[in-house]
Amino acid sequence: MSDHLSMSVPNKPEYVNVIRLTASSIASRVGFDIEEIDDIKIAVAEACTNAIKHGIKNDQENFDVEFYMDCDKMMINIIDKGVGFSLDEIEEPDLINPKEGGLGIFIIKTLMDEVNISSDIGNGTCIKMIKYLGVDI
């Protein structure tokens, strides 16, 4: 990866838009089109919301956002130091009888080209998302 930008973000919902705007600016610089940028912004917002809602319970702590940019892709890591969870707890959503909530990971996986989630109970979660330039997977 050529360029790297890291942010330590307060664990408060009002900062999600700051991260969305940062992701949008970086994605535009890499060369993504408007549709792809919108996908990236939505995925980033979902991952940040998960970190805030399910990660850290103390709003005085921060979570980290890392952007890696290359000429053909953008990778975004959302890392919280929260409670973590068992990856077996992630359920496939019932799209026929949807319930409120529980779609965040599904949305992220739908919008990004690659998604890798790692979580360690007691030590937090990392959602790694990759979007490739000019690839429609």
Image: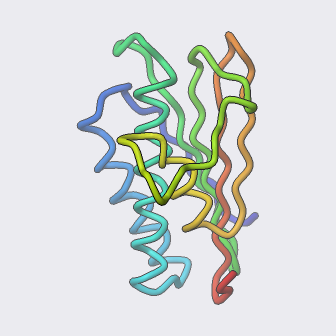
Q: Quadrant of the C terminus?
A: bottom right
The residue at the point 74 percent across, 21 percent down is: 120
Question: In the rendered view, does 43 fall on the left or right side of 89?
Answer: left
For the residue pair 90 and 33, the one nearer the viewer reads as 90
- Residue 11 drawn above or below residue 129: above
- Residue 33 or 118: which is nearer the viewer? 118
Compared with 93, 43 (above or below) is below
Residue 83 image-quadrant placement: top right
Q: Position of residue 53 (x, y in %)?
A: 41, 27
**Residue 4, quarter of the rendered image:** bottom right
Which residue is farthest left? Answer: 14
**Is residue 61 shown left or right of residue 124?**
left
User: What's the residue at 61%, 66% (across, down)?
Assistant: 112
**Residue 69 vs residue 49: left or right?**
right
* Residue occupying image coordinates x 37% and y 56%: 20
Q: Position of residue 44 (x, y in %)?
A: 47, 53
Q: Position of residue 12 (x, y in %)?
A: 30, 28
Q: Name the residue furthest front.
A: 97
Placement of the N terminus among the 4 image quadrants: bottom right
Q: How is the image coloured?
A: rainbow
Query: Exactly how many numbered labels are in the figure?
Result: 0
Which of 109 and 16 lies nearest the eye of the viewer?
A: 109
- For the point 45% across and 23% down, the residue is 62
